[in-house]
């Protein structure tokens, strides 16, 4: 049976569905043809109401079809469909990431602090050490701890100060700098970014392949990979990199896992630059004991606290929880959970990056000024981050003022 209702069209640019006004026009033609053109086309008539209902049904069906078509494109896929695309690349969505913080542990020289040792912050959040560490001759050891609970939990400097489970010889703990705040379950944008990076997983030697392998390590929040292919040392992104050397800066994950990921993907004969050295044993290439081993170097980034100051025009529409809404929007944008790019190792954090997220809160947001910096009284418009640094943002570092 023929109909005057237009169908969706498959064009080179994608699927185009008819507007509901075109659907209504097509339905009237079908109805008039069935009733010899004698129908009153007023929408308040019974036939008008029926046509409007049918148009709404057809329009909703077209929208559902359009959504499904878009969901098979990695650029637009979300939720369950994005998870399915990810599985083609052997990827699964990362669960909520815990807050990670580098602590100074004090005690007797030679004391081993096992992986999984527990400490407690002033807000009662319990953290566990990522890898084993030995207290040095100076009586201190630098140990990375992660919150047992995932999600964006703040850990200001000095707040992780209590040993939760005693280890003989370990006397005290503190975090000299703010922790890297955790994140909620991996967002659509972050998952797609990681999927694109993983496409190079079958390659070896390329920077994309190394970065993709490191980002796939459990617990790694961010990573930056570059190289110096020249015959002399060079300064790149504020860091001196040795000649003919690869440089990997990774936050999160155990030292052994990160080093193994780098070694798996880098080309033979390439040197390493970094302050962390791990011995990687090649026990997967068919060798018999003793297995060959290699010293792999990489860098652990220094956390750079970011401070943001926001001034909004005071008006009658400003809600009572405006400050909380502004902070939540900025933190989401900082982490890339708003659909944009997040603040990363080696990036530049721009103040205007957060303006769009604030405007999306509603017409009550009338932005007067937004400044950013690394001190509690920021005055700048951007913060360049070296490739050995990772930017961090705590909600308490966002000042909101109505002027």
Image (cartoon, rainbow, N blue to C red):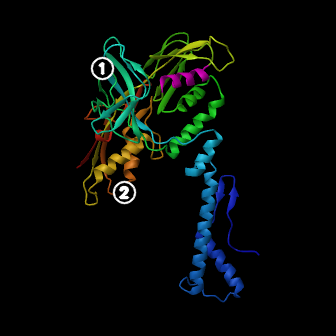
| Secondary structure type for disc 1 | strand
Q: Which residue is mark 1?
A: 106
Classify 142 as above or below 9.
above
Residue at 66% x, 89% y is 38
Q: Dot 2: within a 10 Å radius of its alpha carbon, few (fewer than 14), some, or many (20 or more) residues?
A: few
Main secondary structure of the magenta stretch:
helix
**Residue 75 visible in the shown view:** no
Query: Is residue 260 a member of the stretch shown in magenta?
Result: yes
Residue at 56% x, 82% y is 49
Q: Which residues are magenta?
A: 254-266
Give the x, y percent position of residue 207.
Answer: 58, 25
The one nearer the camera, 91 or 72, is: 91
Give the x, y percent position of residue 12.
Answer: 69, 52
Q: Which residue is mark 2?
A: 362
Q: CA distance from mark 2 to mark 1?
A: 49 Å
Horizontal side of residue 124 vs 203, given as left or right:
left
| Secondary structure type for disc 2 | loop
């Amino acid at each position: 049976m023929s109909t005057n209702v237009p169908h969706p069209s498959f064009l080179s640019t994608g699927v185009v569905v008819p507007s509901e006004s075109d659907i209504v026009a097509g339905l009237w033609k079908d109805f008039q043809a069935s009733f010899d053109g004698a129908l009153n086309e007023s929408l308040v008539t019974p036939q008008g109401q029926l046509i409007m209902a049918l148009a709404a049904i057809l329009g909703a069906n077209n929208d559902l079809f359009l959504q499904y078509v878009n969901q098979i494109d990695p650029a637009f896929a979300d939720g369950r469909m994005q998870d399915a695309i990810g599985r083609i690349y052997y990827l699964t969505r990362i669960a909520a990431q815990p807050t990670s913080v580098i602590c100074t542990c004090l005690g007797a020289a030679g004391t081993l602090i096992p992986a999984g040792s527990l400490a407690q912050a002033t807000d009662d959040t319990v953290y566990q050490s990522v890898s084993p560490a030995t207290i040095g001759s100076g009586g201190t050891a630098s140990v990375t701890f992660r919150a047992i609970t995932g999600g964006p939990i703040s850990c200001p400097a000095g707040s992780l100060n209590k040993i939760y489970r005693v280890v003989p010889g370990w006397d005290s703990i503190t975090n000299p700098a703010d922790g890297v705040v955790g994140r909620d379950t991996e967002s659509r944008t972050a998952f797609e970014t990681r999927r694109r990076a993983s496409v190079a997983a079958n390659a070896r030697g390329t920077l994309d392949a190394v970065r993709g392998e490191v980002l796939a390590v459990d617990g790694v929040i961010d990573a930056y990979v570059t190289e110096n292919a020249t015959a002399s040392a060079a300064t790149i992104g504020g860091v001196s990199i040795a000649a003919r050397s690869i440089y990997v800066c990774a936050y999160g994950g155990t030292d052994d896992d990160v080093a193994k990921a780098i070694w798996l993907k880098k080309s033979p004969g390439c040197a390493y630059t970094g302050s962390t050295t791990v011995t990687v044993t090649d026990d997967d290439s068919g060798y018999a004991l003793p297995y060959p081993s290699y010293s792999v170097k990489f860098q652990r980034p220094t956390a750079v606290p970011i401070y943001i100051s926001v001034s909004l025009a005071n008006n009658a529409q400003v809600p009572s929880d405006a400050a909380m809404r502004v902070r939540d929007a900025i933190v989401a944008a900082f982490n890339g959970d708003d659909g944009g790019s997040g603040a990363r190792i080696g990036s530049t954090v721009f103040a205007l990056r957060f303006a769009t997220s604030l405007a999306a809160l509603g017409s009550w947001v009338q932005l007067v000024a937004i400044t950013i910096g690394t001190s509690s009284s920021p005055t700048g418009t951007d913060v360049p981050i070296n490739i050995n640094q990772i930017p961090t943002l705590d909600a308490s570092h966002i000042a909101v003022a109505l002027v």
